Image (cartoon, rainbow, N blue to C red):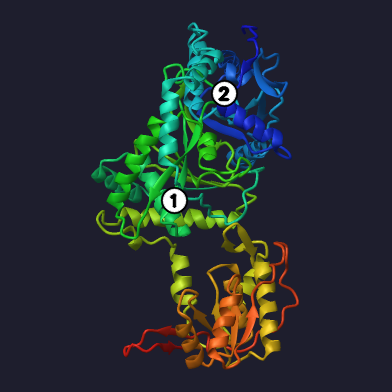
Amino acid sequence: MTARIEPGLPLTAAQTEIWFDEQFADGDLAYNMADHFDLRGPLDPARLEEALRLALDEAECFRVRLTEADGEPRQTVEPLETLPYTTVDLSGADDPQAAARAWMARDLDRPIDVTSFPLMRAALLTLGPDHAYLYLCAHHIVSDSFVRPLFYRRLADLYTALHEGRPTGEGQLPPLKTLVDDEIAYASSRRAERDRAYWARTYADAPDPVSFAGREPVHARGFLRRSTTLPRPVVQRLRALAGRAEVTWPTLVIAAAAAYTQRLTGADEILLTLPVNARTSAAGRSVPGMVANYLPLRVAVAPGTTPGDLLRTVADALLRTLRHQRYRGDRVRRDMGLRADDRRPFGPFVNVLPPEPELAFGPCPATLTNLSTGIVNDFMFSVSDSSGDDVEIHLNANPELYSAADLDAHRDRFTAFLAALSEAAPDRPLAGVGVLTEAESRRLLVEWNATERGGGFAGVVERVRQHAAARPDAVAVADGEVRVSYGALAVWADAVAGRLAEAGAGVGSLVAVLGEPGARYVGGVLGVLGAGAAWLPLDVDAPIARQTGLLADSGARFLLAGPGQVARAEEIVAADGSGVRVLVLDDPFPDAGARAEGLRPLAGGEDDLAYVIYTSGSTGRPKGAM
């Protein structure tokens, strides 16, 4: 092994982002990347160890020590005195492959300290005669997904050369300094300025980031994954859909993720997050290291958008994004006005994994399986690409934001959505493509609409309380920057019901609600129903005469006034002159840790009136529908 030590090099921009992310975090983050090879045949463990030693000597990124001097991080390439390599014999286990998967899962869950050396580790797991797994794990700060095929191909070639007694051809991989110098040159180039101008122009009025979690972003300290394999007929139909639109498989996957995200969030324009390799130069494509980037992809999905429309829109946006992929995502975030400490990505990640390289270690064919592509702060769609019809879907999520059940539901729902999309006519609106699983459709259309009596009824307030008991910390209402948990909402609505009851409202009463849409409006309606009364919505922008007319016609004796509507409510009541009582919805919500305990019994039953909504009426006079 060549014992060469480079002088300290600057970190790449991608490395710098990770370095400071780790420094400011309270504890280790889930930055591990990992893969394993399934090796079949007469493998020579000593030869494999030597091939790994030679490969790590060439791939300097795996031999850097990270330090900080005067607030500036540096990386120094050092020789490996000891190979970070373990051998484990699992051949005696009842199920060696299951034992190997469990061993790798435990190791993957063990973060690599960013200040340790080296920032990678490997293991050979023996499963039986002529069968083994080669496991490799590295901190994302030294390696990105582009490095995987580059490094693995070299590793396999070195083993094969040793096996065949050929020269190993040391020095096939260029030094790390080549990659660092290339990035420094880009930063001061005209191309960098053109890229900056493109992102500033395209995303000056970008929509806000969206998330499936509905909770404040937090650091990812763990890793949650759910996987499935798409049925081949679905893959074939999706490939045919892409072919008709003349787009690539990655374009189709990204478009499907955009449509799914739009359906679940309701936003007409959404942002996705795309990981890109940011390697547009010859130097960048030949040197192992970490320069990967993540960028936003802006996609509009209107109600009438067809699959064909969406595929063409995404193909065009993707092409323009890749032309400017070296401009750093953190700078795009800053230019968009997003906070530096905001952990949210632009939106769900969509990572289309390239076909795994077909490799052999001498006489041993090797099948590569990805275990983790690195940290996931929120949610990631990870879909494999291949020349055939064997396509895997991996949904990765931050376990601080999603439960295993949440991810199971997304996996089943996204798989069902892809199946429905594969059968959709290219010229019919996407709004007609189902986004629910069969079980969810049955629950919504059959179980929740069952009209038979016998104790099966549960009204909306009962359901909110049930959810508050089961998952009190889950977000119930997102109102701007305010997130109200189910526990807090149930407690707050119960207090509103108590105030109404004390004021004399109950079964048979009608309570008008005047307010802008938001958390207090939702809580107010739940409070009315909890008191056994019915609610009547009033339009805050309607003329006073219209509002007083509705009060008089409906007979409502109470009026709930939302934030900013107290003066308007008093004006309405004064004009009405019938003594309607105003109650103000201005109490603060309890904190997110509130528990729905000791709530008053709900008044009324399933046959009581829930609400009255006024229509224009066929005669032009408003009529209340009960």
How far from the left and from the top, in percent, is residue 524? 60, 76
Which labelled disc corresponds to residue 481? none
What is the quadrant of residue 376 in the picture?
A: top right
* Residue at the spot 64% in from the left edge and 26% down from the top edge: 121
How far from the left and from the top, in percent, is residue 28? 70, 37
Q: Is residue 218 left or right of residue 203?
A: right
Is residue 355 in view? no
How many labels, in total? 2
Is residue 143 in view? yes
Residue 545 vs 415, above or below: the answer is below
* Residue at the spot 57% in from the left edge and 55% down from the top edge: 213
Disc 2 to disc 1, C-alpha distance: 30 Å
Q: Which residue is mark 2?
A: 12
Residue toward you, 522 or 397: 522
Q: Which residue is mark 1?
A: 270
Q: Is residue 76 left or right of residue 231?
A: right
Lower sequence index among marks 2 and 1: 2
**Quadrant location, the N terminus:** top right
The three-letter code of the residue at mark 2 reads Thr
